[in-house]
Amino acid sequence: MEFIGHFRRLTQVQRNTFIACFLSPLGVRGTLPGFAYQIGNLFSSRDSVIQAKVTESRYGGSFAPVLAWTVLLVASLVAVVTWSGRERRGVDLSNTN
């Protein structure tokens, strides 16, 4: 079960890294995706340990509430970051150089 959760987190990080590649300036286009990938791995590396400790201390071994709170927290953070972005609708992104 933990492998599936880790796989889902990695695929999300890879998807965000792919998007960061196209939205980054030319000078850092080769560096930024790898940096973003590593920072994502750094933040998610302790996730399973924290979830396990919270599960043991508060929910008596049931992972479902902890996973639900994790999803809610991450979705909220993504919504805030998306809402605060500078991107505009209808902008032509075909000429990015």
Image: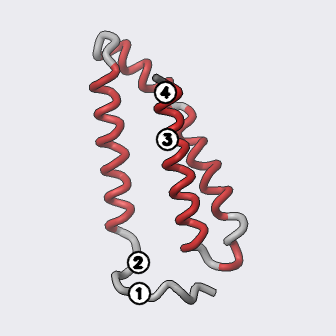
Dots 1 and 2: beta carbons under 8 Å?
yes
Above or below: residue 23 compared with residue 95 = above
Label 3 Cα crowd, 10 Å radius (few <14 / some 14-19 / many 20+): some
- Occupied quadrant, residue 34: bottom right
Q: Which residue is mark 2?
A: 87
Residue under the image location 46 percent in, 26 percent down: 50
Residue denoted by label 4: 48
Cβ–Cβ below 8 Å for labels 1 and 4? Answer: no
Q: Amino acid at mark 3?
A: Arg
Question: Residue 78, image x and y in percent?
Answer: 37, 55
Q: Amino acid at mark 2?
A: Glu
- x 57%, y 34%: residue: 45
Q: Name the amino acid, label 4.
A: Ser
Viewer-side residue, 4 vs 74: 4
Neighbours of disc 1 within 10 Å: few (<14), some (14-19), many (20+) = few
Alpha carbon separation for disc pair 4 and 2: 33 Å
Counting the numbered discs, the total is 4
Query: Circle 3 is placed at which residue position?
Result: 9
Numbered tag placed on residue 91 in the rendering: 1
Q: Helix, strand, or loop for circle 3?
A: helix
